[in-house]
Image: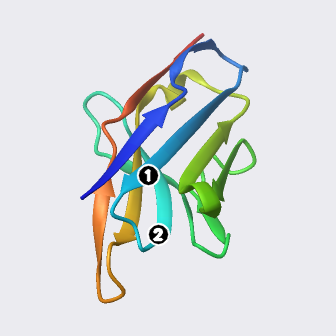
Amino acid sequence: QVQLVESGGGLVQAGGSLRLSCAASGSIFRIHAMGWYRQAPGKQRELVAIITSGGSANYADSVKGRFTISRDNANNTAYLQMNSLKPEDTAVYYCNADVASTPIRSYDYWGQGTQVTVSS
C-alpha cells in the first residue's frame, strides 16, 4: 500500500505565495508521473501540473508562469510552488502519483487534499 500526504496549504492574500508538498510512502518500487490537481466548490477536479520521473513538466494554461512543479526522487516527494496567487486559485489541492510497488504494474494514488484559500 502507498500513502500520499500533502502539506503546505493555507490562507494567503492575492499576490502571495505558497508551497505545497506531497510525500509518498509505503511499498514503492518506482514512482512514475506525479501531479497536482485542484477542485473548487461546485467545479470538477482539474489538472494543475504534472511532472514525469525524468523531470518534464506540463501545466494548465491558467497557472503557467505562476506555478512550478518539481520533485525529489530520492525522497519520493513532489512540490508545487505557487506564486502570484489569485482568488480563483482557491480550491482543495490534491496530489496524484502513478506508483509501482513491483516492476510489473503501477497504480494511481491520491492524497487527502489540502485547502488553499486566496483572499482578495
The percent position of residue 49, horizontal first and vertical second, equals 55, 55
| Crowd tier of the residue under label 2, counting other residues whose Cα lies within 10 Å: few below 14, some 14–19, many 20 or above | some
**Badge 2 vs badge 1, beta-carbon distance below 8 Å:** yes
Residue 10 locus on image (x, y percent): 52, 17
Horizontal side, residue 25 vs residue 7: left or right: left
Residue placed most toward the observer, 70 or 66:
70
- How many labels sit on residues? 2
Quadrant into which the C terminus falls: top right
Q: Is residue 62 visible?
A: no
Q: Which quadrant would residue 70 be assigned to in this image? A: bottom right
Residue denoted by label 1: 24
Residue found at x 30% / y 58%: 109
Q: Residue at x 29, y 38 (%)?
A: 43
Using the rendered image of the protein, determine whether residue 53 is visible from the camera's viewpoint. yes
Expressed as whole percent of the image width and height from the top left, the position of residue 6 reads: 44, 37
Describe the element under mark 2 as helix, strand or loop.
strand
Residue 101 or residue 118, whichever sits in front = 101
Return the x and y of residue 9 as percentages of the image width and height.
51, 24
User: Circle 1 sits in a helix, a strand or a loop, which is it?
Assistant: strand
Residue appearing at x 57%, y 51% in the figure: 78
| 96 sits left or right of 32 in the view | left
Give me the C-alpha separation between circle 2 and circle 1: 9 Å
Quick one: label 2 or label 1, which is nearer the N terminus? 1
User: Residue at coordinates 33% horizontally, 63% vertically from top-left?
Assistant: 27
Disc sitting over residue 31 in the figure: 2
- Few, some or many residues within 10 Å of mark 1 (<14, 14–19, 20+): many
Residue type at tag 2 = Ile
Residue 28 vertical position relative to residue 80 in the rendered view, above or below: below
Q: Vertical placement of 45 versus 59: above or below?
A: above
**Kind of residue sitting beneath label 1:** Ala
- Image position of 104 (left or right of 59): left
